[in-house]
Image (tube, helix red, strand yellow):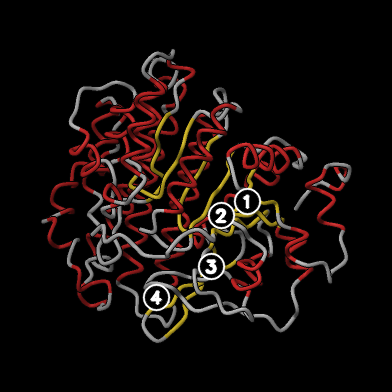
Amino acid sequence: MFNDTLKSSSFEKGLFMPAAASARAIARQLDDPADLGRVLDELLAARAEPPVLLGLGEPTHGIEAFPLLRNEILGLLVERGYRSIALETDIFAASAVDDYVNGAAADIDDVLATGFSHRFGAVPGNRELVEWLRAHNADRAPQDRVRFHGFDAPVEFAAAPSPRRALTSVSEYLPAALRPESVGDLDALLGEEADWTNEAAMYDPAASVGGSDRARALRVVADDLASALRRAAPALRPADPAGYDHALAHARTALGLLRYHAAMAGSGPDRIGALLALRAEMMAENLIAIAAEEQQRGPTLVFAHNVHLQPGQSRMPVGEHDVSWGSAGSLVGIALGERYVFVATDANPNSDPDTLQGVLAEATTRRALFPAPALRAALASSIGAGEPIVQGHIPLTPADLDGADAVIFVADTDGKRHDYW
């Protein structure tokens, strides 16, 4: 993944060490901010094209070491021209956080409760992030402020909302003369919100409204609205770029939610994988839109679970089975190429020495970054992954290194998770 033309840099030389080289020789120790800044510079300089999205993953949610590392990295990246951060949270809820960090009057506890989905406002490190962004932006011109984005679909693990808000927002944004005739049936087709949010539908296709005639009719309405909005771009967007882009986000969300509900009504053997892939598609579309929106101001740091950002197939245990799907990072990587960078993270305070985590722990003093291709070459072919340290922790495997740019291993954490739900 690193540019062969940059072999002279200290970062690049690590790629050409013999396969038997120890992980300690490959490691870039991150014991202080100066070390971290130098390694970030080397990582970014090794790209053939300047990145527009830098993905930083975490192996689980709620362990404070990872959001705190994210906050530290963001501060250094802002010094290097980054002007936004995108988190694994509802794209529309995040606007409450963005308004607050840009000076809107609000109570921070309310912002944390409403501006993050998945109850992530209570995750350690997120309050500190929001407070830092507001203070940083306070005396800066709009073009120099650091914006806050969400890139997740408005779904939760066991439920998804109706497309009501998304469809209504697009319809109301369009001038009456441009609204398609199909929106006249919108309220009747949507019905009651409870029809859509039934949590039983996650595991029982028969409980889902997604396969009904009215859900299929709504997909036509959503397509009509999206098409009308795109065709109206020359007339509407020049006068109101932000409003138009917001409506466009609602249009693609409506289509995505309706596809998601249709998949919930399916009964195929890979049903959960299909739902995860559809969520990944929505995430990727949002990230590409954020990159386009921010292209004139600077790159974006993206933070989410490793499984969402890593290139290639992601995997997750669901019940007794492992489910795999093409991640958002894979889709973004196809679209952006060298302009997308992905750094995975992991930790295990009690690493088995015969696992990948054990190798990384032995080579790490406090925190260390390992160039992924060099690390992959240095590993024995028989090595595997360690055990999860908490429920929801997905330890990195050697295969996860394929396509990644680097791995940061955090040794100075107890691995305990804050209960944020």
In the rendered structure, are the residues bearing label 2 and label 3 in contact, judged by CB atoms less than 8 Å apart? no
Where residue 4 appears, as percent x and y from the top left, is 86, 48
In the rendered structure, are the residues bearing label 1 and label 2 in contact, judged by CB atoms less than 8 Å apart? yes
Q: Earlier in the sequence, mark 2 or mark 4?
A: 4
Mark 1, residue position? 333
In the drawing, what numbered circle is on residue 271?
Answer: 4
Quadrant where the C terminus is found in the figure: bottom left
Residue extending farthest to the bottom is 320
Identify residue type, mark 4. Arg
Mark 4 lies on a secondary structure that is helix
Q: Nearer the viewer, residue 264 or 51?
A: 51
Identify residue type, mark 3. Ser
Where residue 84 appears, as percent x and y from the top left, is 48, 32
Residue at image position (41%, 39%) is: 227
Report the Cα–Cα distance between label 1 and label 2.
6 Å
Report the Cα–Cα distance between label 3 and label 4.
15 Å
Of badges 2 and 4, the one in the foreground is 2
Report the Cα–Cα distance between label 2 and label 4.
21 Å
Q: Earlier in the sequence, mark 1 or mark 4?
A: 4
Mark 1 lies on a secondary structure that is helix
Mark 3 lies on a secondary structure that is strand
Identify residue type, mark 2. Gly
Mark 3, residue position? 314
Residue at image position (86%, 60%) is: 17
Mark 2, residue position? 329
Q: Splitting the image into 4 quarters, where does residue 189 fall?
A: bottom left
Q: Report how many numbered discs are placed on residues in the image.
A: 4
